[in-house]
Amino acid sequence: MSARTTADAGSGAGDDAERSAQRPARQDGAARKREQRGWYFYDFACSVYSTSVLTVFLGPYLTSVAKAAADAEGFVHPLGIPVRAGSFFAYTVSVSVVVAVLLMPLVGAVADRTGRKKPLLAAAAYTGAGATACMFFLAGERYLLGGLLLIVANAAQSLAMVLYNAYLPQIAEPDERDTVSSRGWAFGYTSGAFVLVLNLVLFQGHDSFGLSEGEAVRICLASAGLWWGAFAIVPLRTLRDRAVVREAGAAPVGSGWKQLVATLRDMRRHPLTLAFLLAYLVYNDGIQTVISQASLYGAEELRLEQSTLIVAVLLVQVLAVVGALGMGRLALRYGAKRTILGSLAAWALTLAAGYFLPARTPVWFFALAAMIGLVLGGSQALSRSLFSHLVPRGKEAEYFSAYEISDRGVSWVGPLVFGLTYQVTGSYREAIVSLVVFFALGFVLLARVPVRRAVEAAGNPVPERI
């Protein structure tokens, strides 16, 4: 939790003094812009992991490795536990989320108490990049190695994002944050698209390069780790740590779950911040479910080829850049809250349109991918920047750990609703349209949050447009 325990939450003067002491001196414009440019490059560095590794290559490849190691009934036995080979990847992702959830609050609290975000960011980034690069050795029947590397890489990426996001309130003035956050997402989607194009050239033409399909995949996986590690140097050379003043008698950092509970208790003093976090949890669950299930919908319901689905993923990456920058500009004019609300309405309409897509017609699936891409980057970028206004100073990493948990660790209700709907109806069309409820409910919850009052309650200056 923060430098104050909940037991002394009533000492408002002490909290004000702490915030004042922790408030960094106002940077001149050139220094601030330099840090912002460096900050963008962490998204540029790590987004290739999400795109090439998690979204495209690792799931099918790790599943094939697990199947090669399976017994006659199709089971592998990690730690003596019988697991269907086809479920190993999904279970491993779930384990990585649990590990991240345990560690994120602890890392966030340590970063806020010590002010040393950059060494922690470096440790998390290079742990994740190293684990990803080592996926080159994932061959034969080494499914356990693949599972271990996935857990390490995924958990490290989650920890790094807590620290990365926590820099946003420190490097951008209130009126700049929507633009800065949107540019960060745009940098990430640009690198994801660029590296994915290179990976697809290698994968599709592996014979002409004298490689087997498996060797091509392993090179694609390892290259994502090398890219991540190489470009992480830029933010680590540019970003700087801020000194903090700790309040006398501050409670020590606790274990992961204990620290999360303490952070949530502290957030009870900021109920409007919690209200936004609840709204974000709901609509982001819908976003994450669409991302994870759209390819399944295309393959099983629309009967599209794998090459079509990969091109659609690439199209989403490219248009997400345009969407992130475009929605950042809209936020300058209409405010982040209104722009996010507009994006949620667009998400709902997109899913409704997806219900009516004809099978075996790639052009309409590409149109759906284009609609998703245009709202994907902006809705995520503006949610991050809006939340940054609602975080009390000196508690950035701690509060962003809760934000990251809601982003990565609690997005299971949507897939459950999707799966149950399919189980009951036998139709992926009914399943995809069932996700509209997440965007409708998220819209209502966000619309009820008085964001100006929430910013003031957090002790932060209120931007002209919010």
Image (cartoon, helix red, strand yellow):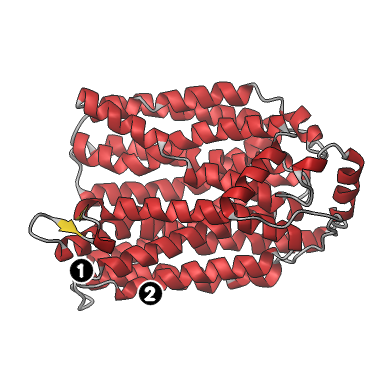
Identify which residue, 277 or 385, lies in the foreground.
277
Mark 2 to mark 1: distance in Å? 18 Å
Disc 1 residue type (three-letter): Glu
Which residue position holds label 2? 134
Which residue position holds label 1? 213
Instruction: Name the residue located 32 percent from the left edge and 51 percent from the top edge.
Output: 91
Q: Position of residue 218 (x, y in %)?
A: 30, 70
Left or right of 45 on screen, residue 36: right
Residue extending farthest left: 72
Say few, some or many: other residues with alpha carbon within 10 Å of mark 2 (under 14 / 14 to 19 / 20 or more). Answer: some
Q: Position of residue 199 (x, y in %)?
A: 33, 65
Left or right of 117 on screen, residue 42: left
Looking at the rendered structure, the secondary structure element under dot 2 is helix
Instruction: Name the residue located 85 percent from the left edge and 59 percent from the top edge.
Output: 245
User: Which numbered disc, 2 or 1, marks the residue that appears first in the sequence?
Assistant: 2
Identify which residue, 160 or 355, lies in the foreground.
160
Left or right of 269 on screen, residue 213: left
Instruction: Name the residue located 55 percent from the left edge and 38 percent from the top edge.
Output: 379
Residue 23 appears in the rendering? yes
Identify which residue, 284 or 316, lies in the foreground.
284
Which quadrant holds residue 37?
bottom right
Looking at the rendered structure, the secondary structure element under dot 1 is helix
Q: Quadrant of the C terminus?
A: top right
Left or right of 21 on screen, residue 322: left
Label of residue 39 in the image: none
Residue 164 appears in the rendering? no
Say few, some or many: other residues with alpha carbon within 10 Å of mark 1 (under 14 / 14 to 19 / 20 or more). Answer: some
Q: Position of residue 124 (x, y in %)?
A: 55, 66
Disc 2 residue type (three-letter): Cys
Q: Position of residue 422 (x, y in %)?
A: 25, 29
